[in-house]
Structures are given as C-alpha cells and as structure tokens.
Amino acid sequence: MAQRSSAGRGGTATRTGRGAGNQTQGTPQVSEATISRMRVDEIRGQLRQHGVSGTSALRKPELVRTLVKTLRAERRSSGAKGPGRRAASSGRSAGGTAVRTGPRTSRSVRSSQVIAAPTDRPERPGRSLVTTNHEVIRRWARQRNAKPATIRGTERDGRAGVLTFNMPGYRESSRVREITWVEWFRTFDLRKLNLIYQERLRDGRISNFFRTESPDREDG
C-alpha cells in the first residue's frame, strides 16, 4: 500500500470516485483517463515527486488511482483552480527529495526511476535511477567504499567544481581530490544537481555507474 511520506499530505491510497467524463469528483481538471495513458514509470515518478513512496509493488490501476487521489488532495488543500501539477520544478528541502528539472533536463533524467527516499527500491536490476536525496547518495557511496570528491582545476569561487567520487579501482586519478560530505552536498544543492546512477547491472552484479547533471546547463 502506497504511503505518503512525512513531507506530503494525506494517508494511504484508496479508490477514488469518478464523475462525468471519467474525472475525479470535485476536481474536473484531474482526468483519470489522461493519467491512465501515462507509462507506469511516469506515474511512479510523479507519485514520488509528490511525496508518495512505497509504490514499487503497485500495479498500474492502483498507481493511477493513487496519483488521482494525490492530485485531488493537493488541489483541495491548496484551493488551486488550474490543471493539476505534473512535476516539481526544483529540488525540495530536507535533504533533497524531488528531481530537479529545467530547460535542459535530459532524456536520461526523465526516463530514470526516481528514488526519493532510502526505502525506495529499483524496479529491476540495471534500472537507471535518479535522486537528490542526501541519505540515498551517502548509502550508495558507502556500499562502494566511495569518498566524496571533486576534480582538481574545476573549482569555482573557492567552491568545489565537478563533483565525483574517489572509488577504489574505479576512478583513480591525480586530479581527484577528496572533500567532505558537507562541501559535496553544499555544491550539489547550490548547483541544483541530480545524481543519475545504478544499483545493479542487468546480470545482478553491483554497478558503479554514476554521473551528476544540472537541468539548467549542458554539464553537471
């Protein structure tokens, strides 16, 4: 059963009523038919961006009903009169729980599964993932004995430049300089970055793939 995270509003998912035109009661702009035409990954991504986690076990009909209920609850709470919000436009607070989007958001970000909390799990091995959550990133690095780092020579205004990880046997380079997590995350949030990464390869082996990306620029 999908649960609203502490940052969101509402409780467990229940079946929603339908009105004329297959729209939710009291919120005619939220169309269940429109949401039903979305891909499963897109629906799950929207739910996570709206603060709903624990959706990996839900099938599409349940996901559709959960997203409809979530949008309806948010519209009633905010008193909004326009179309339901489809996605977060910037990172949220509390350690980063939403994907940051912008004019140059890549297809990789849009097609990746959003991991909004440490309790979220990849849908399958080899799945491309995206997160801004600090604890998720720390856990991923810790499992690989990777240390927060930057690339020498890319510093800007006294701050860390290109963010990376010093990973044993993976990215050993004289240009890699280890930094603290405080400095790494300060730069990560200041530049509004996303971390695209993998947990496992398709064959189940652990994956060290990662890259940072800014939705406002061509590079991360």
Image: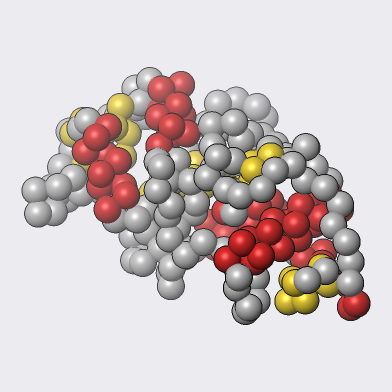
In this picture the colour scheme is secondary structure
Q: Where's residue 115, x and y in %? A: 56, 42
Q: How many numbered marks, from 0 up?
A: 0
Residue depicted at 48% across the width and 46% down the height: 97
Q: Where's residue 31, x and y in %? A: 79, 72
Q: Looking at the image, which residue sits at the far left?
A: 158
Tell whether 20 sits left or right of 214.
right
Residue depicted at 77% across the width and 66% down the height: 35
Residues 190 and 18: in front is: 18
Residue depicted at 41% across the width and 42% down the height: 94
Q: Which picture quadrant has residue 46?
A: bottom right
Residues 77 and 191: in front is: 77
Q: Where's residue 124, x and y in %? A: 70, 37
Residue depicted at 80% across the width and 42% down the height: 58
Q: Quadrant of the C terminus?
A: bottom left
Q: Where's residue 48, x and y in %? A: 61, 49
Q: Which picture quadrant has residue 32?
A: bottom right
Q: Is residue 35 above or below residue 153?
A: below
Residue 74 visible somewhere in the drawing? yes
Q: Which picture quadrant has residue 73?
A: bottom right
Residue 112 visible somewhere in the drawing? no
Tell whether 214 sits left or right of 161.
right
Q: Is residue 206 above or below residue 65?
A: above
Tell whether 161 sits left or right of 45.
left
Q: Quadrant of the N terminus?
A: top right
